[in-house]
Image (tube, helix red, strand yellow):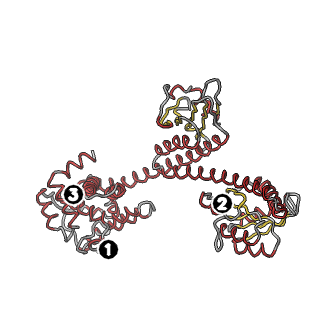
Amino acid sequence: MKGTMGDDLKIVVVDDEESILDIFKSYLESVGSYEVFTAKDGLEALRIIKKEKIDCCFTDLCMPHLDGIELTRRIQLYDNTIPVVVMTGYPSVDSAIKTLKHGVVDFLTKPIKMEQILPTIDRVMRERTLFVDNIILKEEARKNQKLLKVNEELQAKIGELETMNLILQRLNDAMSSKDIFNVLVSMAGRITPCDESHFFVSTGDCLEHAMIASYYRDNVKPGISCGHLREDLLRRVSEDGMPYLMQGGNGDGSLMAIPLKIRSSVFGTLVCIIRDSRAQFSDRDLYFLNFLGEKASFAVENMALYENIYENLFSTLYAFVEAIEARDPYTKQHSTRVSRYAMTVAKAVGCSQEDLDRLNIAGNLHDIGKIGIPDKILLKPGRLTETEYEFIKKHPVIGSNIIGHLGMWGDEQEIIRHHHERWDGRGYPDGLKGEEIPFLSRVLSVADVYDALTSDRSYRKKMSEEQAIKIIRENAGSQFDPHIAEAFLELHESGDMQRGIMINFP
């Protein structure tokens, strides 16, 4: 029975990425007496296994035609002595449990390090030899002991995968840098036996540190604040960029400090403390805290990049709006007021925070398309000709297209495009009718008309409040969604419109 790296082994590697197959084949054939077969999916691999006497199989999980889980099950039905090693770039507890049921003996996480391959082959082939010997000799006790050991090792790996997936999930759910730091300290408490954990951000040239997030097990704070941590310890971790571990003894607790880096530069330090001198951090704790620190650093960098891009982008677009309003002094601050009126109505009718955020962006940018309207039309003091009016009617489409090119605000793009549609279908640009019009566009429409009526324009003076309210009331059900118009009128009559704007939008 072949079982070690010194033997001639037939190995099949299954992956839908040709580069991985080429790397495996080249590497194994260059380092030992291996005959390597490659397959791009499970069906092709089964044909090879039934034709050749294969000793070991490495397979990816996600493949076309026949995935790794089903391939493993069929291999076990055909020959349950062939060890199967799963390779995956997206480890999960569910996939681990499914493959365990069908004879998987090991996991390799992508990207795979070449130095892992030979020890893995040696290990699984030794285990295969023992397994086959047990079948032949019917040494039930020995077989049970071996299977138990393999199961314990796999269960430990499943536990590691579960912990890593939990870390990634919690960090992925974070909505801001502050959320990431809170997840960082709370997860440190969950995956290690520490009694407290703290995150310190470096200031200046890493000469000073400020504590911005903390976790205490069972919400029990010690008598002495973590502020007693020596600044030189934090400075040393920041300068060295390496984890620091101080195991307890003689009545002292244990401490572990993990640096967080962005592009090799330390920007903060995670500190975990065990108060009881009888408990200590393990190598496993160090491994998971390092993993947590690396992923948190990556999340912070992505968050900072996104927030910077988002803020710069919105500033650029709003500069366009200000440029439009600067061209027409009669409409100065029109977009800001429209956004505030619309959000006040949206709150009153029960819109979600996500809808309010969308309406805020769309309201502030709803007239951005007027950047493409010539001044001789936009600023014309008299009545527009039919041709000029048709040109003005293009601004919702122009604005929608400007937003659409960004690829970020699909809902906002739709709101802007349709804010001049009418409830009776006589609006523009698409002549949508009734509930065909996006709900938030209907909200924005009422706010836009109200502010236009009560503001000075190049072609007329502003109307009185009474005249504007009369027009909105008379056009409810024709120009405006009657329910939204009614909500607007009620807010205006009660004074809640102005109060809401002053309270919520100082």
Which mark is nearer the camera, 3 or 2? Answer: 2
User: What is the three-letter code of the residue carrying label 2?
Assistant: Thr
Residue in the image at 50% along x and 49% along y = 303
Pick whichever of labels 1 and 3 is earlier in the sequence.
Answer: 1
Tell me, yes or no, whether the two marked residues, 1 and 3, touch with CB atoms within 8 Å. no
- Crowd class of label 2 (few under 14; some 14 to 19; many from 20; radius 10 Å): many
From the top left corner, tell me how far across and down residue 150 is, in percent: 73, 55
Q: Are marks 3 and 2 in contact (CB under 8 Å)?
A: no
Q: Is residue 345 left or right of residue 461?
A: right
Q: Nearer the viewer, residue 420 or 301?
A: 301
Q: State the image coordinates of residue 239 (x, y, percent, origin top left).
A: 62, 33
Instruction: Indicate which disc, 3 or 2, sits on the residue closer to the N terminus.
Output: 2
Disc 3, SS: helix
Q: Nearer the viewer, residue 83 or 439?
A: 83
**Separation of residues labelled 2 and 1 (CA atoms):** 49 Å
Instruction: Find disc 2 in the rendering and name its residue.
Output: 88
Image quadrant assignment for residue 68: bottom right
What kind of element bears circle 1?
loop
Whether 290 is drawn above or below 2: the answer is above
Q: Position of residue 106 (x, y in %)?
A: 72, 57
Q: Which labelled disc corresponds to residue 430?
A: 1
Q: Amino acid at mark 1?
A: Asp
Identify the image quadrant of residue 14: bottom right
Element carrying mark 2: strand
Q: Looking at the rendered structure, which numbered label has been put on residue 230?
A: none
Name the disc covering residue 451, or none.
3
Residue placed most toward the observer, 180 or 143: 143
